[in-house]
Amino acid sequence: MAKLIDVSDLNIYYGDFLAVEDVNMTIEPRAVTALIGPSGCGKSTFLRTLNRMHEVIPGARVEGKVVMDGQDLYDRDVDPVSVRQHVGMVFQRPNPFPTMSIYENVAAGVRLNAKRMRKKDLDELVERSLRGANLWTEVKDRLDKPGLGLSGGQQQRLCIARAIAIRPSVLLMDEPCSALDPISTLAIEDLIGELKSEYTIVIVTHNMQQAARVSDRTGFFNLSGVGKPGKLVEVDDTSIIFSNPSQKATEDYISGRFG
């Protein structure tokens, strides 16, 4: 199920402004790739290009290629909705659908994708997804209660359950723990470690300790100057990035000497 993604010569624009320049990297399947770097360097912008969320912003566009198992996601005949079915996303703040129950939150993605299912099959899918998000035991007796009634950490795991319910190949996570307390953060990090056996996972994080804990590979993005585009400085195994990076800018950022 997990897919390899090859990004080549990728330039990301907002109108005429070049936001991220010339990204080349391979994102490995069944592994966690962390994206680190200072605010405004293009990490989240790049992340959104991997499921074509970037282009929902008026005037936004990309040049270059994002190829998943041989298919360029930006080919003219590729449907963006189909891309997002294969590349799920979890956002910075938990965003369960406010008027829906826990059950309906998980089932929503399947229903939005017009997949008709028998009640028994849908029940099994909801349970499987909640188990996959390590949430089933905590909510199995209140599936008809509002998703907003859960704690922040539980809500984020509910959003992960919703994302994996449609059986994507790739999971994108944009600072998924930034709004959570340390205990909930640890639960999400443990979950990421479990999910990588089935998915390709890319996570944006400002927490370098988190990147070191959860990721197999790390990419460092940086700004070349005020008003200049963000760039991928280097990407390598996380152990190398944090112990022996090839670029001085990476070393300075990791060591806290940045700027």
Image (cartoon, helix red, strand yellow):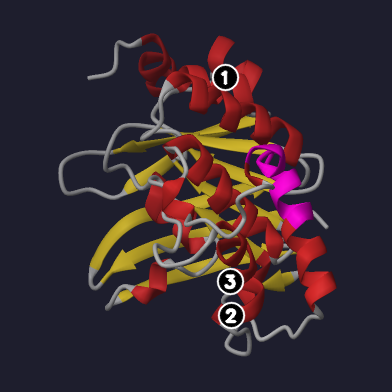
Q: Which residues are magenta?
A: 127-138
* Mark toward the start of the polypeptide (1 vs 2): 2
What is the distance, in whole Å, between disc 1 and disc 3 at their CAs? 34 Å
Q: Are marks 3 and 2 in contact (CB under 8 Å)?
A: yes
Residue with the mark numbered 3: 108
Residue drawn at point x = 56 percent, y = 76 percent: 74
Q: Are marks 1 and 3 in contact (CB under 8 Å)?
A: no
Few, some or many residues within 10 Å of mark 3 (<14, 14–19, 20+): some
Question: Where is residue 129, by image quadrant?
Answer: bottom right
Residue drawn at point x = 49 percent, y = 17 percent: 209
Residue with the mark numbered 1: 212
Few, some or many residues within 10 Å of mark 2 (<14, 14–19, 20+): few
Q: Is residue 76 left or right of residue 190?
A: left
Residue with the mark numbered 2: 112
Q: Is residue 133 magenta?
A: yes
Residue 4 visible in the picture: no
Tell me residue 54's x, y (percent): 40, 67
Q: Is residue 218 above or below residue 111?
A: above
Q: Which of labels 1 and 2 is toward the front?
A: 2
